[in-house]
Image (cartoon, helix red, strand yellow):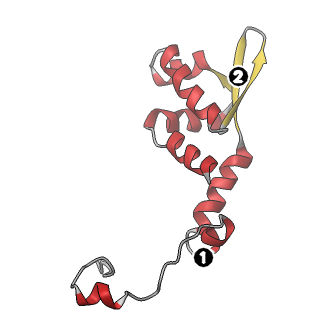
Amino acid sequence: MDQIVQMFKALADETRLKILIILSRRRICAKGIANYLSISEAAVSQHIKVLREAGIIIGRKVGYYVHYDLQKKLLLDIEEFIGQLNNDEAINAYKLDINIPDRCKASCKSNKNKCCQRDNN
């Protein structure tokens, strides 16, 4: 579960998402990414660090530069996790100790709390 949380945190940034889009098209170095995004190489390096620590990208030394690639298996894992949210698979797969009742507890209804009411918009 920690790895999934780290991946979502890494993906929660517009620039990092743009970097992933670039990497989905080609293997490229930090300087190339900086040129595409019109930002400094230092800024790209910071974003790459977050993406590497989350395991979303890997780097391979090619001569003087490091070229980056997507870890497509990890992206498939994220896709699978999101798909599991449509049913109870996520709770079972990640062994979450969560009991989500189908109905409100009587105490919730009697206190007129809105914690169990669904928004029907």
Q: Nearer the viewer, residue 52 or 28?
A: 52
Res 4 label? none
Q: Please indicate whether residue 112 sits to the left or right of residue 21 in the image.
A: left
Kindly give the residue lying farthest to the left in the view shown: 112
Crowd tier of the residue under label 1, counting other residues whose Cα lies within 10 Å: few below 14, some 14–19, many 20 or above: few
Q: Secondary structure at mark 2?
A: strand
Residue type for callout 2: His
Q: Position of residue 78 (x, y in %)?
A: 63, 54
Q: Is residue 93 above or below residue 64?
A: below
Tag 2 near tag 1, CB within 8 Å: no
> Depth-wise, is mark 2 or mark 1 nearer the camera?
1
Residue under pointer 1: 88
Label 2 vs 1, first from the N-terminus: 2
Res 67 label? 2
Q: How far is the residue under mark 2 from the one under mark 1?
A: 39 Å
Regarding residue 22, the answer to whether it shows in the image is: no
Residue type for callout 1: Asp
Q: Please indicate whether residue 120 sits to the left or right of residue 101 in the image.
A: left
Q: Nearer the viewer, residue 66 or 35?
A: 66
Q: Is residue 42 above or below residue 78?
A: above
Quadrant position of the N terminus in the picture:
bottom right
Q: Secondary structure at mark 1?
A: loop
Crowd tier of the residue under label 2, counting other residues whose Cα lies within 10 Å: few below 14, some 14–19, many 20 or above: some
Q: Please indicate whether residue 6 sits to the left or right of residue 68 in the image.
A: left
Q: Is residue 50 above or below residue 81?
A: above
Quadrant position of the C terminus in the picture:
bottom left
Regarding residue 104, the answer to whether it shows in the image is: yes
